[in-house]
Image (cartoon, coloured by chain):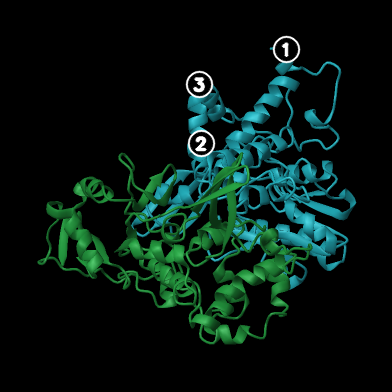
Amino acid sequence: MKKVIAREKLPELWKSLAAKGPLFLPIQEGPVVLFQPWSEGAEANLDAVNTAVSAKDVFLPREETYLQYRCSGNQLELIPVENAEPVIAFGVHPCDLKAVEMLDKVYLDQEPSDELYRQRREKTTVVGLSCREPDPFCFCNEFGINPADAPGADVMAHLKNGLVLLEARTDKGKALLDQAGDLLQDGSDEKFEAAEVKTADFGLNLEGLPENLKERFEDPVWDELYKSCLGCGVCTYVCPTCYCFDVEDFGHEGEGQRFRCWDSCMYGHFTDMAGGHNPRAGRKERVRQRFMHKLQYYPETFNEIACVGCGRCLRSCPVNLDIVQAIKALGGETVEQR
Amino acid sequence: MAERNVESVNKVREAVSQDLLGGRIDLLLGWEKGHYWWQSRPLFARSEADLEKLAWDSFCAVNLSRYLLEELKDHDKVGVLVKGCDARAFNRLLQDNMVRREQVILYGLPCPGMLDYNRLVEKAGGAPLEITEENGRVIIKVGSGEQEAQRDDLLLDKCKDCRYPDPAVYDQLLFSPQGEKEVTERFKTVEELEEMSAEERFGYWEKELSRCLRCYACRQACPFCSCRECFVEQENPRWQGRAYQPSENFMFHLVRAYHGTGRCIDCGECERSCPVDIPLQELNRKLIKDINELYGDYEAGLDPEQEPPLLTYRPDDPAAFSEK
């Protein structure tokens, strides 16, 4: 099913799609673009290449309440929170969607699967958006990702000459386009192909890297690489493939809610253990953990490197200690390019 | 510009080489180029080969003084390249007894202000390919041609209202000083916020802080945040929760700002480090302004002998809260 809509008509489309549940879009929030639920008056920005924080927020929200509690006397009442509304994620770029597939492997493809994630994933309809011009930070080509297409999308969207072309690829996708009804016009005459997009070429040679790193836990490279790390959590929070969370309560006077929220292996307390031991006591151990997870542990289990080349850590790390820096330091660079 | 730049890097390298290779310092904290010409990242130099990578250009924004907290544990003597703000950051750490002066050699770099990549993009109307600088002007090359801009218009926000581009403390000054700059707009936004009603102001900060990811980059980059254990991480009592709620956002940012009252050197590293561009410097500047109004002009980090107003007591200190 192929449909088109003029870009100036998009606010009407947002209104119609948001009627049934949260519609996540790249929204201009002051100086930055964030993937957020649209509301009347919000300014969607489909031209932004990458949102400051990745689209994982839709599938694995930074904060997700799943239980409410109330205590009175000896009585404890637990009220599960249902997150049953259908969600639309509109404008997910190929790198971010590829990253969601990596989260799927962690949360869905293993036993037991993660119920909260599964519910959210199943009820979300994803509208992928092809990239027209990459950011200088983009390097998804290095991971074999085609910025012109997001294979896992329910609907694939392209921006073209003042139009948005929408192609439904799954039943969920068809249902979404049906929901928009007359706002969309037939697009069977349009050419639904995005032009090829070339992203930054860092000359990375990733072949064999995970295998190579297996024996390099004590490699001296770690003694240097971590030095500039400030120990903040920017990289993990903007990263689309980081998926660690913590569970905490928010409330007072006997009532409140239990939620899970993003956590970061860059924080000292991440691995605090009862009794006071911390196996990753310093920044070196934590930096090693983060990069080993992306480049060795994840690939060992799931057969692919846990990076999609979205470039967010290259853009946002305050001291430019990013994944490309790490890959190069670990020898994952084509020698001629050195 | 390219030649001038090579010249000045060489001058810096020459100055530090003698000390590093001659054993006067064990480590030099400087900058090297990252992947891009608009990024200069921290360099931890121990050898001549390391010094080959040294950079000193318009993108050396990272404040290196903070690394002393860790590096002085492993080294007897460390050399640091310091811009104006980095030198004030050093004084901050000195005043907090976090570093020892005799363990550090400071190489002073009077600073022209660092450029903001995002402003270059804005000005160029697309991804800039390269820039050349001449006499306060910047020529930005883009795919379609060139754009010219005033250098001052391309500065990082943190550099725009910098009053002291020259290092306040150094062992060796590597270039001629620029002198104190007149700044007119340092408190402009703070004044605008002061004009708002309490509700409006609350709404403003609630909205701005709602973007906070609690990544703590602001704290980690900050030279006044040198506590060995931050209240955020304290378990018992637990001050800071992780919920993305306005109360928790305010808890973190206001407590942090208050903790820096009279101690913040206004380097703006917090704001530069923020991945979602929260105007954190305005919080700090409000408190700087209050300190100035209550206790007389005070510039944190300028003079390590001068105690921060809130860390000292004078019988004639104002008591504005009780007087009202």
Of pointers 2 and 1, the one earlier in the residue sequence? 2
Whether residue A205 is visible: no
Instruction: Residue B43 in the image: state x and y as whole percent.
Output: 69, 63
Above or below, comparing residue B234 to residue A313 in the picture = above
| Residue displayed at 59% across by 61% down | A320
Q: Nearer the viewer, residue A301 or A137?
A: A301
Q: CA distance from mark 3 to mark 2?
A: 14 Å
**On the picture, is B21 further left or further right than B40?**
right
> Is the residue marked by circle 3 packed among few (<14), some (14-19), or many (20+) residues within 10 Å?
few
Q: Which sits earlier in the primary sequence, circle 3 or circle 2? A: 3
Residue in view at x 51 percent, y 36 percent: B206
The residue at which mark 2 appears reads as B206
* Dot label at residue B115: none
- On the same chain: label 3 and label 1? yes
Q: Amino acid at mark 2?
A: Glu
SS at mark 1 in the image: helix
Q: Which chain is cyan?
A: B
* Residue at the spot of label 3: B197
Label 3: chain letter: B
Left or right of B314, for residue B140: left
Image coords of residue A106 (percent x, y): 49, 73
